[in-house]
Image (cartoon, coloured by chain):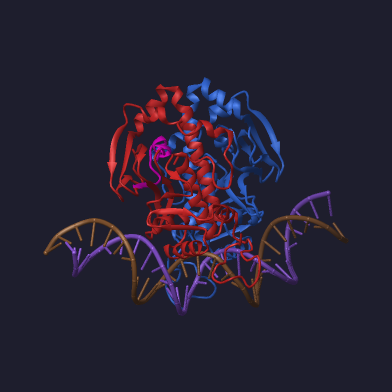
Chain colours: A red, B blue, C brown, D purple
Amino acid sequence: MTDIRASATRSPTGDDATGDNDLAALALLPAFRRRQFQPDQEVIREGDPAPHAYALVSGWAFSYRLLADGTRQVLAFHIPGDMPGLADALLGRSSAGCKAATPIVANSLPAYQLRAALTHDPGLAAPVLRALSREAVAAQERMVDLGRRSAVARTVHMLLELGERLQRAGMAVGNGYACPISQILLADALGLSAIHLNRVLRRLREDGVLRFRAGHVVFDDPARARRLALSSRQDTPEPYPGRPRHSTLPGP
Amino acid sequence: MTDIRASATRSPTGDDATGDNDLAALALLPAFRRRQFQPDQEVIREGDPAPHAYALVSGWAFSYRLLADGTRQVLAFHIPGDMPGLADALLGRSSAGCKAATPIVANSLPAYQLRAALTHDPGLAAPVLRALSREAVAAQERMVDLGRRSAVARTVHMLLELGERLQRAGMAVGNGYACPISQILLADALGLSAIHLNRVLRRLREDGVLRFRAGHVVFDDPARARRLALSSRQDTPEPYPGRPRHSTLPGP
DNA sequence: CGAAACGTTGACTTGTTTCAATAACTGTGG
DNA sequence: CCACAGTTATTGAAACAAGTCAACGTTTCG
């Protein structure tokens, strides 16, 4: 995940103009080897002492950590243009697993070759440093989501953020995008149970905010969605008493 | 926060030997300027388009993001040896604020000088890349805490992790360490309300796991603490019925 | 000494999880 | 083409963890 600079809660910065193709030079290194993976296939094994870095060409992947009891926290979704495993390759040990969410094509580079390339070509360091820095900012956004936003705000926020990234990658049109991940996977990213996420999605759908169905996300009311994404846990969800029926989302 | 490599949940790796003084070269750059800050004083302003990078010499600091309603998510605690603002300086825009938690001394370097130094001295890139990568791993740990661990596990886990970092920095002795942060601040890092954190700490104290008082943390039962830190949300907290009285922590 | 943080506690409310059960979808082989 | 198994989605009811509100103790510091 190297591609996030602006999230739903902060507007793009001047730096953005330079961002998208930072890694083009790196991705073109001849040492990269084209590989394919099937859905649910492991791309990076957690704990691997000599992992590869990848440049995702097509499809979706995700990074995750497994807990003792089988619980899973999804740390990031990867879309084409991202470089999963970059930080791990630099440290020489992968701290998280990475799996394909759809069939994917990715260029791989062994960690030692990545480090060698950085030594021999000083011009390579700058884009990699920026990529890692953006990853750090994306992780911050995730921490804010998980720590301080309600389930509804978190959900809307992440879907908006994904939309912005896809838009920048030219993979989104208008108010929606193809989102080939299951509710289970999304729930594991949002720190929610799949059941509760399902209820959240239902409410968002019934309230006309967005629809998450059949591999597609459509924002029926993008402005309201953006407003919702900013609300945090103790925001008064009920501007007026005796509101219609099922919804407890902040009104327009 | 550049200093975490191993967390309470994963053992140190072979890479660790090289880690601690990665940034010594950087910190010694003549351009660094020594600065002092008082508790609660702003070191980095969120949104600053030309931030500084810092090398923390003494005292504690923390990075945070503010939400619309005044809520705060603390993203990281910084101890001596850490380099708050590194990623932000590289991107040219600070995505999070940073404040002193105690009186601190820090060396500062303007972002443009940092970028210039990286261009002119190719040997500098490698340690900075590793520092950022470690920061990424630390953020992952935080996401797992916030997303998938119970309040008790999260709390114990973070206090253990802080202990390990302080140990490596030579600032911890035996089973405890000086921890000059308020419960409010810790709660904002753990994604909990201060009130609930207070109850969690009381239970941990009454159960003989650890004490967090008067600026000090003491682990009365380190082994049990480590076990608790690994438990996640749906772990059965009650191995036997009719347990003593107040505790709902997993037994020894 | 008084003010202002910070810490502590109780009672109550709410969001989220869990359990259990059923429907809808997907791919596969007969 | 349909029946099957397996995953994913959906729903209700009940349990629980964490948050909110209000109050009071405690420490710190000017």
Is residue A180 at all visible to an observer of this figure? yes
Task: Choose top left, top right, bottom left or bottom right for residue B235.
Answer: bottom left
Specify the quadrant of the image occupied by residue B102. Answer: top right
Q: Is residue A71 visible?
A: no
Q: Quadrant of the N terminus of chain A?
A: top left
Instruction: Name the side, left or right, on which B98 lies relative to A89.
Output: right
Front position in the image: A103 or A247 = A247
Where residue A12 appears, x then y in whole percent?
57, 39
Q: Is residue C17 above or below residue A64?
A: below
A72, above or below B131, in the image: below
D21 with respect to B96 (left or right): right
Where residue B146 sits in the image (x, y, percent)? 51, 55
A86 within the magenta span:
yes
Q: Which residues are magenta?
A: A81-99
Considering the image in quadrants, where does the C terminus of chain A appear? bottom right
Give the residue at x 53% y 50%: A143
Nearer to us in this view, B180 or B191: B191
Q: Is residue B198 left or right of residue A108?
A: right
Residue at point 45%, 43% (across, down): A166
Residue A205 magenta:
no
